[in-house]
Each structure stands twice: as C-alpha cells, then as structure tokens.
Amino acid sequence: MASDPESIKGIILKTSEYKEKDRLIKVLCKDRGIVNICVKGVGSKNSKFSFASIPYSYCDMVITESHGFYYLKEGSVIAGNMGIMNSLEAMAVAGHIAELLSLSVMQSENSRDCYELAIYAYYSLSEFPGRHLEIMCVFNWKLMWLLGLATIANECALSAGIKLNNRIYEILDYIGQNPVSRIFTIKLEPQDISILRKFTLAYISIQFENEVADPIYKLNLP
C-alpha cells in the first residue's frame, strides 16, 4: 500500500533508464539526503514528467512510498540550470559535483549543508559556465569542510604532505570559513586555479581513499 503523498524539494543528480519508459532519478534533498525515485512513463511522448530526464535541475516533487520504493506523483522545475548544457566542460564539472555528492552525502547528517552547497554550485555553473574550473575548486574545498574532512588550510596541506603558498592558504580558508552564499563570487587568478585544481582533487582522493580524476581531463579535449 502506498504512503500518503509527501512534498519535497531536491536536486536531480543523476537519471538512469529503468524498464522501457521509466527512469530512476537520484535526488539530493535537504532533510533526507540522497533518495532514489522511480518516475513512471517519463519516456512516453508528452509525459508530464519529462523534466525528470534532465539532471542538475532543482525541483518541487510530490512522492509516495510503496514497498520500499519512492514514486514521483507530481513535479515541477524551480530552476532548470540549463546553462550547464551549453558547455562540455560545465557538464563535466556538473557530473563531478554529482559524483562527489553521491559518494559522500547519502543519508548523512551533513545533507542539509551539502544540499545548500549543491544549489549554489549548480546555479553558478549554469549562469557562468566559463568559470567551471573556479566553481569546481570552490565546491571541492567547501564540501570537505562540510563533511568535517578539512579545517585550516595549512594544517590540511601539511597532513597531506603538500606545501602551498600563503595566498592559496588564504583562499582556501576564505572558502571554508564563509557562508555558501558568498564563496562562489570569489575571483581567482589563473595561477590560483591551477594550484587549487590539483590540490583539492588530490586532497579529496586522500580523504576518500580513492582517486578522484579531473573531470576536464576525462573529456580528452584537444
């Protein structure tokens, strides 16, 4: 027997095929963390759930639970973040963000903070796809702070056996210590981005005990 309908807001991190015309969507919610929701008939022509086929959008949803599965009953888009789709690099970074969130949030007590981070990261990436590397660096480090895996930058770098300059330490501490609403407006120089790109990915790989590849390099662009 299905549960009573429940309204949630969430960001679609991933969509995958399920049966012939259905989809499974992975959604990051404020209080629930990450949940998987079955969307029936989304592959049909003129489906009212066609929005659920597009990742990285921020949506209102009404769901029910039946036999341990969530099902989408109604839904609408709050922010489509369609600007991401105009850039291969922005799409690659968006996928990177979704992958890290999927690996780390789950039903975590940090889901509320990570949810807010994801909203700002995807909005920024949609509005400024050309700043994909800056956005990736900022997201990477703030996620580590929210998960309790990073603190003062020079201490973190020392623990990882990496030496950085004072400017980079200041940038990292600014990202870590300021609200999510402020950090994506930071302006970084090309040399800053180059260092932060390598360091944050290396640091995450150490903390996750698994190599996290640079999403732009994975594109194999000339």
Image: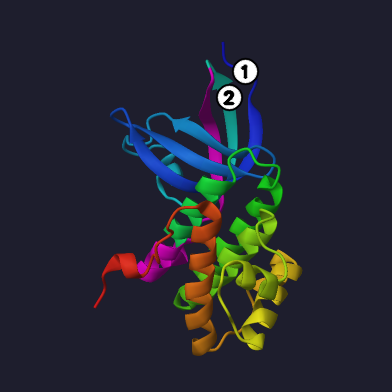
Q: Residues within 10 Å of mark 2 (few under 14, many from 20)?
A: some
Label 1 close to label 2 by CB (< 8 Å): yes
Residue 175 showing in the rendered view: no
Q: Nearer the viewer, residue 26 or 159?
A: 159
Quadrant in the picture for residue 220: bottom left
Quadrant location of the C terminus in the rendered image:
bottom left
Q: Nearer the viewer, residue 196 or 2?
A: 196
Quadrant location of the N terminus in the rendered image:
top right
Image side of residue 208 versus residue 117, left or right? left
Color encoding of the figure:
rainbow
Question: Residue 80, position in %: x, y?
Answer: 51, 56
Question: Residue 192, position in %: x, y?
Answer: 54, 85
Q: Which type of secondary structure does the marked residue at label 2 adopt?
A: strand
Question: Residue 207, position in %: x, y?
Answer: 56, 56
Question: Residue 72, position in %: x, y?
Answer: 51, 31
Work out whether 91 lies above or below 51: below
Identified at 71% across, 72% down, the residue is: 182
Write down the residue under mark 2. Answer: 64
Identified at 54% across, 71% down, the residue is: 137
Q: Nearer the viewer, residue 203 or 31?
A: 203
Residue 80 showing in the rendered view: yes
Amino acid on which disc 2 is placed: Thr
Identified at 30% across, 66% down, the residue is: 219
Residue furthest out toward the left: 222
Amino acid on which disc 1 is placed: Ser
Image side of residue 41 versus residue 174, left or right? left
Write down the residue under mark 1. Answer: 3
Span of residues in magenta: 68-93
Identified at 54% across, 51% down, the residue is: 101
Q: Is residue 82 shown in magenta?
A: yes
